[in-house]
Amino acid sequence: NLVAGTCRFGSDPATSVLNADCRAHEVDNLYVTDGSFMPTGGSVPYTWTIYANAFRVAERLVHHLGGVKPGSAA
């Protein structure tokens, strides 16, 4: 059983831990890419969803650090 739902998404730091890019509201440069960003564990394995989100967040980080624009070819 995988643990999920411990780092809620949202725009308000009072009611959530992460913004839409999985970046922590209260800790600079902390990104969460494990299963805790998922609202619940669900009834099926969600490993591929975690992988996909990790790649999405990595793309945002590359852009944030001055690399290519998210969604564009390198």
Image (spheres, helix red, strand yellow):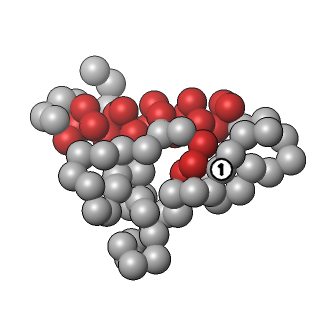
Mark 1: which amino acid?
Ala
Question: Image point 34% across, 34% down: which residue?
Answer: 59
- 57 or 26: nearer the viewer: 26
- Quarter of the figure that contains the C terminus: top left
- x and y percent of residue 27 in the render? 26, 55
Instruction: Give the vertical position of 8 relative to 54 (above or below).
Output: below
Where does label 1 land, which residue?
Answer: 4
Instruction: Give the vertical position of 30 relative to 72 (above or below).
Output: below
- x and y percent of residue 61 in the render? 28, 37
**Figure quadrant of residue 2:** top right
Q: Secondary structure at mark 1?
A: loop
- 45 or 52: nearer the viewer: 45
State whether residue 70 appears in this view.
Answer: no
State whether residue 54 appears in this view.
Answer: yes
Farthest-out residue, right: 43
**Figure quadrant of residue 45:** top right
- x and y percent of residue 10 in the render? 45, 69
The answer to whether 27 appears left or right of 39 in the picture is left
Graded by Cα atoms within 10 Å as few (under 14), some (14 to 19) or many (20 or more), the crowding at tag 1 reads some
